[in-house]
């Protein structure tokens, strides 16, 4: 069916962008990023969100973030609910500028961070003279220094691994998935070995 055709290269590009957003290489994360402070919406790692930005400071911040996005570097910002707290490194995966100056962004939250310091930096002025004349005055934008929060391994990880192995062995005894390939399709979702492994 031609209507259901998927461009395999587009799928690979999307998968690569998602992987970079969720698990960025340490050397690709800058020391300072612009920050969106949204007290009513804290993003968790792996969470997707859509925002319609209309306040001049957030529109300017989106413009700044998108201007840094290239093939090698994603348009990233820090999404926080409090300038002194925790948040996530968030990537703008898609955006759309509207005729009235608003911007719609689709984001994916990546690793958790802890804010260590904040600074106000001037927004970059639009390059076009007409845009500069029409653009409202924007206060300095918030940028933050941060540390990426790495989850320390639990001391009892081996206990969890042993429990997971025991559960999977018991499940295999009830429904031998390796001997009956059709059994996997007939299992209810709760008893799916892949789901149980999570």
Image (tube, grey):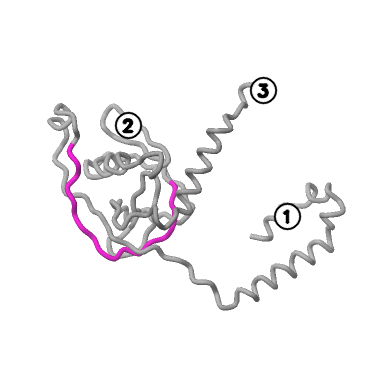
Mark 3 lies on a secondary structure that is loop
Is 185 in front, or is 90?
90
Q: Which residues lie in the magenta part?
A: 108-125
Q: Is residue 47 left or right of residue 40?
A: right
Chief secondary structure of the magenta portion? strand
Q: Is residue 27 left or right of residue 102?
A: right
Q: Nearer the viewer, mark 3 or mark 1?
A: 3
Residue 196 place in picture, x, y as percent: 69, 60
Q: Are marks 2 and 3 in contact (CB under 8 Å)?
A: no
Is tag 3's residue or tag 1's residue first in the polypeptide sequence?
3
Residue 176 place in picture, x, y as percent: 84, 57
Q: Is 50 part of what is drawn in magenta?
A: no
Circle 1 is placed at which residue position?
192
Res. 97 mark: 2
Q: Are marks 1 and 2 in contact (CB under 8 Å)?
A: no
Is tag 2's residue or tag 3's residue first in the polypeptide sequence?
3
Residue 45 place in picture, x, y as percent: 46, 56
Is 144 in front, or is 79?
144
Quarter of the picture containing the N terminus is: top right
Mark 2–mark 3 Cα distance, whole angstroms, equals: 33 Å
Res. 1 mark: 3
Is 160 in front, or is 80?
160
Q: For mark 2, does the 10 Å Cα neighbourhood hold few (<14), some (14 to 19), or many (20 or more) residues?
A: some
Mark 3–mark 1 Cα distance, whole angstroms, equals: 31 Å
């Amino acid at each position: 069916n031609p209507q259901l055709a998927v461009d395999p290269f587009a799928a690979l590009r999307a998968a690569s962008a998602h992987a970079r957003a969720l698990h960025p290489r340490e050397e690709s994360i800058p020391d300072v990023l612009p920050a969106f402070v949204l007290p009513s919406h804290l993003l968790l790692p792996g969470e997707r969100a859509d925002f319609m930005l209309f306040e001049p400071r957030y529109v300017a911040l989106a413009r700044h973030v998108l201007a840094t996005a290239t093939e090698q570097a994603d348009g990233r910002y820090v999404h926080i609910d409090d300038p002194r707290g925790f948040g996530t490194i968030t990537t703008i995966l898609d955006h759309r500028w509207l005729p009235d100056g608003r911007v719609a962004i689709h984001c994916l939250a990546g690793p958790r961070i802890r804010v260590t310091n904040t600074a106000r930096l001037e927004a970059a002025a639009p390059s076009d003279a007409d845009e500069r004349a029409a653009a409202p005055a924007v206060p300095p934008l918030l940028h933050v220094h941060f540390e990426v929060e790495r989850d320390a391994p639990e001391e009892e990880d081996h206990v969890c691994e042993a429990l997971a192995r025991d559960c999977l062995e018991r499940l295999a005894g009830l429904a031998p998935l390796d001997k009956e390939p059709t059994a996997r399709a007939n299992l209810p979702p709760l008893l799916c070995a892949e789901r149980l492994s999570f």
